[in-house]
Image: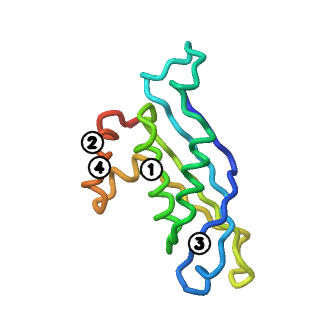
């Protein structure tokens, strides 16, 4: 089963330069979340489900940090969703940043990252949830 959360809007302190980080950047976040086989759609019980509001609250908490790269923020989102929700096997996040007047060549830029990307990244090879992802990977 897959859950999609589309176009969640957030303001995040994000940017390469101090000037960029001095103001909050408008981001649009979309998530695709695959639940493990342990999740049963036969139960009408919120305690065994993923509460979308809890995901929004998690992202709101992460948005209080400062990031230089959109990729780092995406990694934090995936990592923390896996940490908080045991029934989630796979997360894909797309983060879109509306461009400012100083970058007039595109309306926006976006980054898409998923659980499989993190397990392939050597810099994250010792990350705490990688054994879990390797065991349950969609690939």
Tell me the quadrant of the picture where the C terminus can be found. top left
The secondary structure type at the circle numbered 4 is loop
* Count of picture labels: 4
The Cα–Cα distance between marks 2 and 4, rounded to whole angstroms, is: 7 Å
The Cα–Cα distance between marks 3 and 2, rounded to whole angstroms, is: 31 Å
Query: Crowdedness of circle 1 by 10 Å Cα count: few (<14), some, many (20+)?
Result: some
The secondary structure type at the circle numbered 3 is strand
The Cα–Cα distance between marks 1 and 3, rounded to whole angstroms, is: 18 Å
Residue lying at 38% horizontally and 53% vertically, measured from the top left: 118
State whether residue 105 is above or below residue 136. Answer: below
The Cα–Cα distance between marks 2 and 1, rounded to whole angstroms, is: 15 Å
Residue bearing the label numbered 4: 128
The Cα–Cα distance between marks 3 and 4, rounded to whole angstroms, is: 26 Å
User: Which mark is on residue 13?
Assistant: 3
Q: Position of residue 60 (x, y in %)?
A: 60, 56
Q: Position of residue 42 (x, y in %)?
A: 56, 13
First in sequence: mark 2 vs mark 1: 1
First in sequence: mark 4 vs mark 1: 1
Tell me the quadrant of the picture where the N terminus can be found. top right
State whether residue 11 is above or below residue 29. Answer: below
Residue bearing the label numbered 2: 131
First in sequence: mark 3 vs mark 4: 3
Q: Position of residue 20 (x, y in %)?
A: 61, 81
Residue bearing the label numbered 1: 80
Judge left or right: residue 137 versus residue 102: left
Query: Crowdedness of circle 2 by 10 Å Cα count: few (<14), some, many (20+)?
Result: few
Residue 28: quadrant of the picture: bottom right
Residue lying at 70% horizontally and 56% vertically, measured from the top left: 9
The Cα–Cα distance between marks 4 and 1, rounded to whole angstroms, is: 11 Å
């Amino acid at each position: 089963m897959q859950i999609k959360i589309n176009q969640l809007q957030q303001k995040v302190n994000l940017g390469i330069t101090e000037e960029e980080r001095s103001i909050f950047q408008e981001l649009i976040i979309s998530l695709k979340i695959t639940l493990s086989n342990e999740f049963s759609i036969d139960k009408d019980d919120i305690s065994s489900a993923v509460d979308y509001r809890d995901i929004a609250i998690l992202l709101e908490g992460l948005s209080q940090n400062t990031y230089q790269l959109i990729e780092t923020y995406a990694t934090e989102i995936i990592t923390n969703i896996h940490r908080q929700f045991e029934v989630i096997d796979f997360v894909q996040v797309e983060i879109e940043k509306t461009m400012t007047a100083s970058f007039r060549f595109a309306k926006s830029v976006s980054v898409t990252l998923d659980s499989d990307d993190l397990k392939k990244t050597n810099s994250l090879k010792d990350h705490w949830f990688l054994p879990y992802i390797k065991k349950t990977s969609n690939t």
